Image (tube, rainbow, N blue to C red):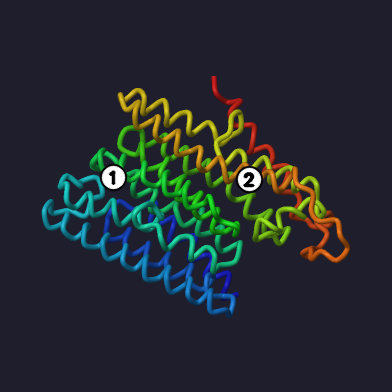
Amino acid sequence: MSTAMIFVGLILSTILATASNSWLLAWLCLELNTLSILPFISKTKHPRAIEAATKYFLTQATASCLLLLAGTSNAWLTGTWDMTQMSNKLTSTTMLIALTMKMGTVPTHFWLPEVLQGSTLLTALLISTWQKIAPMSLLFIMSNNIQPTFTLTLGLLSTTFGGWGGMNQTQLRKMMAYSSIANMGWTVITMTHEPKASMINIFTYIILTTPTFLLMALTSTKTLQNMTTMWSTSPLATTTMALLLLSTAGLPPLTGFLPKLIIMNELVTQNLTPLATMTMMTSLLTLSFYLRTTYLTTLLNPPSSATSATKWRQKMIKNKTMILLPTATTSTFMMPALIP
């Protein structure tokens, strides 16, 4: 009962923050949102989970302080808490830093890999998807008042560090965290020029990441070594996971390629071709570790020795959650067909 109430509070706080037009109300809803997710992070009685919850709380509290400072300063300068009245460059930049800290972009991204690694897979799913909706919506509202140079710099740095950070990871949750950082860079980079493209990118990422984490949870897959024996649990799950990983990497003609194509087109339209070229080059870093994971999942045979250690998993065929696999597969490669 208590878990259900906390989950309802998590959903309502996000909806209220998204629907608010006052910085004071948005700050209050984001605080309720942070307090609602903390019990899920610290639910497992393990020191790593407690450490993750502490890091998440401290980071989100710092971001909330910056958000309240920017909102209060803007209200003092303009006489209103309205989100659209962010004409001052200092307050708008401070608000941007606060919101990007909550979403996990460079240079305030160091908390995200550690928090995801210390959480369960389902909690990591919430942090990577649902927890980004509220700050992303607030960023969308104030997109007209953000400095373009600042967002372009943050976007390029996030795609670079996200790609480099995920290269050496063997833990899937940390790899997905760095993938999230890189994807947030793609989202932020066009926030001032074409906010709708940024929203398309983040929601496409959420659609692709949700079944990926669910498949990891269903197959008890947490490391790259576990991926090598995933085929023994369900060949269908293995194929779907490979498609989802390649789609998240942005490999055409899968779904993840569509928002990247839109963003590249917008950057070239704004005469930012050098920046678009560098961003495409950094996406190759993300593609490399996703291709490595896909290779381990589908093309690598596990050790055939009877003495080799393999992870025990339950059979998924009788699991009702297997109904998610056709939906995940459809969402992976059907969306580019909508391009006229």
Between discs 2 and 1, the one toward the N terminus: 1
Residue at (44%, 57%) from the top-left corner?
Answer: 14
Q: Is residue 16 above or below residue 53?
A: above
Q: Which mark is residue 222?
A: none
Q: Residue beneath label 1, please?
A: 142
User: In the rendered view of the protein, which quadrant contains the N terminus?
Assistant: bottom right
Q: Quadrant of residue 44?
A: bottom right
Seen from the viewer's position, the closer of residues 20 and 327 is 327
Left or right of 110, for residue 254: right
The type of residue carrying mark 1 is Met
Q: Residue beneath label 2, please?
A: 292
Residue at (84%, 57%) from the top-left corner?
Answer: 318
Seen from the viewer's position, the closer of residues 110 and 58 is 110
Residue 80 percent coordinates (x, y) = 17, 53
Residue at (82%, 53%) from the top-left corner?
Answer: 232
Seen from the viewer's position, the closer of residues 202 and 235 is 235
Q: Quadrant of residue 65?
A: bottom left
Q: Is residue 162 above or below residue 270?
A: below
Foreground disc of the pair 2, 1: 2
Q: Is residue 29 above or below residue 334?
A: below
Kindly state the secondary structure of the residue where label 1 is placed: loop
Residue 251 percent coordinates (x, y) = 58, 33
Kindly report the distance in space between the C-alpha atoms of the residues bearing marks 2 and 1.
Answer: 38 Å
Residue at the top extreme of this rendering: 340
Q: Residues within 10 Å of mark 1 (few under 14, many from 20)?
A: many
The type of residue carrying mark 2 is Arg
Left or right of 335, for residue 161: left
User: In the rendered view of the protein, which quadrant contains the C terminus?
Assistant: top right
